[in-house]
Structure formats: C-alpha cells, structure tokens
Amino acid sequence: MGVRFEADAIEVVYERQSETLFANPRYELERGGDNFRIRIIYDLPRVTGGARSIGAHGVIVLTRGSDGRIQPEMHNLVDGRTGATRTRIVDDPAVTALSLQPCGDHPWREGLRGRLST
C-alpha cells in the first residue's frame, strides 16, 4: 500500500486499484528540503441530503523527519463559518493513512552507503 499525492487528489494506492482520500487538495509548502513541512487543505466531502454550502475544511500538516518518515504533525477540521477547530486526539484514520515510511532499503533511512548519485 502507498499514498500518491497528485494535484487533483490524494489517493491510497493498492496493488491494482486506488481510492481517493481527499479530492482537490491545496498544497502550501512551508519548508522545503529534505526535512520538508507542507500544509494540505482539503474540502470535506459533500453528503447527499447534507448542507447546501460547504462550511468546513480539513487541514493536515505533513513533515519528513531525519529518519525518513513522512508523518502528520497535525490534523484539524475547521468550520469555515465560525472558525472553530476540532482536533482528533486518538484513532484519527487520516493520521494513520498518512504516516508513511519507505519500504526496504531506501536513502531516506539508510543513506547512500557509498553509492554515488549521478
């Protein structure tokens, strides 16, 4: 399983299929480089029979640490009308899905071990 970050969606990728986690995310790079920090803003899905206007959106901040892991630093749901913010403390499925690490040997964790990059 992996996660693909595209301009029009963030998707979970399985062996032969993918599933959209967040449609039309907006990315804001807060810090570049190896230990990046990026804020992702996404609209909550519209539910049939729900409110006619979108009032809330989600905000996830992803970072990559020196150990190579990509992990959410925070995940909030923000009410666009009132500005109230809801933070889930435990068992957040978005945090679980976006806590990533390379599979197998990878320069993020292992370094290049003497290999030259060209």
Image (tube, grey):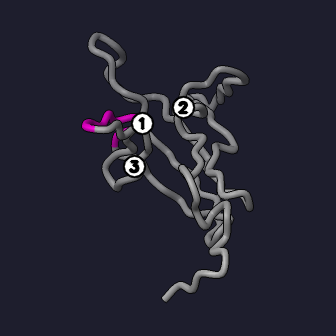
97 relative to 45 in the view: left or right = right
Residue where numbered disc 1 is placed: 43
- Spatial distance from mark 2 to mark 3, Cα to Cα? 14 Å
User: Are the residues at dot 3 and dot 1 in contact (C-beta closer than 8 Å)?
Assistant: no
Task: Check disc 2 and report the residue beneath it.
Answer: 94
User: Which contiguous range is marked in magenta?
Assistant: 16-23
At 39% across and 49% down in the image, what residue appears?
4
- Asked if residue 14 lies in the magenta stretch, the reply is no
**Residue occupying the point 67% across, 64% down:** 110
Q: Position of residue 78 (x, y in %)?
A: 58, 32
Which kind of residue does numbered mark 2 sit on?
Ala
Please provide percent x and percent y for residue 85.
65, 30
Residue 22: in magenta span: yes
- Outermost top residue: 49
Quadrant hosting residue 99: top right
Could you tell me which residue is drawn at 61 percent across and 70 percent down? 32
Seen from the viewer's position, the closer of residues 118 and 32 is 118
Amino acid residing under circle 3:
Arg
What residue did someone put label 3 on?
4
